[in-house]
Amino acid sequence: MAGDERGGDVPGDDASGDDVPGDDVPGDDVPGDDVSGDAGASPGFDVTVAHPARVYNYLLGGKDNFAADREAARQMIEGGAKVLVGVRANRAFLGRAVRFLAGEAGIRQFLDIGTGLPSADNTHEVAQAVEPRSRIVYVDNDPIVLSHANALLKSTPGGACQYVQADLREPRKILDEAAKTLDFGQPVAIMILMTLQYVPDADNPHQIVRTLMDAVPPGSYLAISDVARDLAADVNVVASADRLNERLGTTRQHIRSPEEIARFFSGLEMVEPGLVQLPQWRPDLGYTGPVEGITLSAYCGIGRKP
């Protein structure tokens, strides 16, 4: 399950039709189009089926993706939603969220589920820049993320990093493996960015989140971002999701309403400003992405367990 890393928001022009910074579609000559896996030995999984983590990697300008991932990304963009702006806004939210959690909230332990492929300012880099003793566990189900795990495990001497290959729909496995690195007797920040949208209602994503939050003590936090069915913010969000789903094999993007996303925080105390569009969450904490004057059908928030 990809996250933030994570499956990504959904592209295009703003409502006025003017060009939007960051909305240039990755072309045939961008990094990512020359991937050794395309022509080399089999990587051990089906490269003809797109995966959210690799689609997101391509949209961020990364090189760890395959032709199927690039085509899925292009299909999303052609759907008309604000994909490229959204993925950058989500990455920017990750940085602001971790700075808040490690700084103002004083959190020293992070469980990042759906981490995706390494990029700039990964969770451990942001957290350990604030507090070098921070401990981070990354979780993803994409084999190619596992192959890059070493880049996610370069902790500061006083901290710790670990990687767990698991699906978000396996919360017990995630908790058992994470307990080898994290102390669940102390507060933990659980981060699920752009990942819950890939869990269908039939798999009870709200119960998955409850299971995770039940395992952490009071003073812990939950950070979530996801694409939302907010047609007032982006009339093309559903069309872009449909185009992506045509390329994802058994994985599907399930777009929920802002109200359904808010339910993930049931029983938690919302950190101001609550559940809002990505660039609206604490812009005082840093870069918000190329989003000036743009509305996004992607929401985020952080809640504290009382």
Image (cartoon, rainbow, N blue to C red):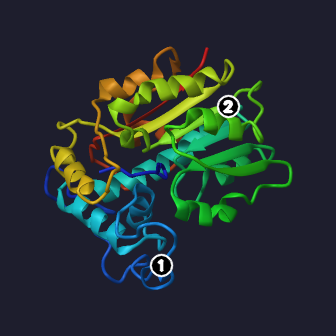
Residue closest to the far right: 158
x, y percent for residue 111: 63, 40
How many numbered badges does the structure rendering display? 2
Q: Is 62 placed left or right of 95 in the picture?
A: left
x, y percent for residue 217: 69, 20
Q: Nearer the viewer, mark 2 or mark 1?
A: 1
Where 206 falls versus 2 (above or below)?
above
Give neighbour class at mark 1: few <14, some 14-19, many 20+ (Cα, 10 Å): some
Disc 2 secondary structure class: loop
Which residue is at a point 18% across and 62% down the rendered structure image? 78
Q: Which residue is mark 1?
A: 37
Give neighbour class at mark 2: few <14, some 14-19, many 20+ (Cα, 10 Å): many
Where 228 falls versus 129 (above or below)?
above
**Of pointers 2 and 1, the one earlier in the residue sequence:** 1
Residue 73 is at least partly visible in this image: yes
Dots 2, 1 in contact, CB < 8 A: no
| Disc assigned to residue 188 | 2
Quadrant the C terminus occupies = top right
Where 181 falls versus 172 (above or below)?
below
Which residue is at a point 54% across and 37% down the rendered structure image? 170
Amino acid type at image mark 1: Gly
Q: CA distance from mark 2 to mark 1?
A: 36 Å
Residue 117 is at least partly visible in this image: no
x, y percent for residue 270: 49, 21
Q: Nearer the viewer, residue 100 or 113?
A: 113
Q: Is 130 placed left or right of 165 in the picture?
A: right
Q: Is 28 placed left or right of 174 in the picture?
A: left
x, y percent for residue 210: 52, 22
